[in-house]
Amino acid sequence: MIYDYKVEKQDGSFLELRDLKGKVILIVNTATKCGFTPQYEDLENLYEKYHDKGLEIIDIPCNQFKEQAPESDSEITHFCQINYNIKFPQMKKADVNGENEIELYKFLKSQKGFEGFGKGPKAIAMSTLLKTIDKDYKNNPDIKWNFTKFLVNRDGEVVARFEPTEKMTKIDEKIAELI
């Protein structure tokens, strides 16, 4: 269950996910130098729209995808506050794949694997890129890129995984169903 996990905050303390029982949680791995970085604005809009109704967003910066989050934790926070005025919490930068991945991501990927990028130009571009990195990318649950999102319902169940190419309107609709 999601409540068995914790995530390290930038100050070295931990966010215990059990403290979020009864909330809808959106967990996202982010980066500051990515083509999807403008999604920070969409995430902040979701946070402002639904936070008072029980939504929490957990931002976990990650530098595993073409080193697109090279800054320190404090520099990432400063960038996000200056450029996107985000108010949701940012955690310590972490790995979401591989031998150093945080335990939370092992769990998330075991609950919702990769289901494809959908359709459209961004989806085609992501598929083309990933074929050059991992020809078997479709057949494993690994996080494929920055801004992959997992949605957790009020009971702590992982109910959806959204790839970075997913339209934010679909994510908004799913959150609205759970709120």
Image (cartoon, rainbow, N blue to C red):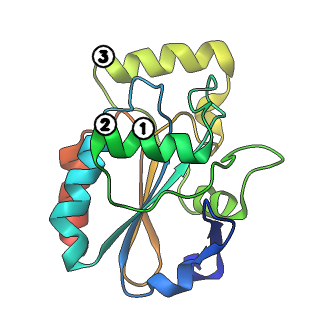
Q: Tell me which residue sits at (84%, 47%) in the image.
A: 99
Residue 33 in picture, x, y percent from top left: 48, 25
- Distance in Å between CA atoms under marks 3 and 2: 26 Å
- Distance in Å between CA atoms under marks 3 and 1: 28 Å
Q: State yes or no: discs 1 and 2 in contact (Cβ < 8 Å).
A: yes
Which corner quadrant of the image does residue 87 belong to? bottom left
Mark 3 vs mark 2: give the one in front.
2
Q: Tell me which residue sits at (30%, 26%) in the image.
A: 119
Q: Which residue is mark 1?
A: 79
107 left or right, relative to 121: right
Could you tell which of marks 3 and 2 lies nearer the N-terminus? 2
Specify the amino acid type for callout 1: Phe
Q: Which residue is mark 2?
A: 83
Q: Residues within 10 Å of mark 2 (few under 14, many from 20)?
A: few
Could you tell which of marks 3 and 1 lies nearer the N-terminus? 1
- Give the SS element for disc 1: helix
Specify the amino acid type for callout 3: Pro
Q: Is residue 16 visible?
A: yes
Q: Residues within 10 Å of mark 3 (few under 14, many from 20)?
A: few
Which corner quadrant of the image does residue 71 belong to? top right
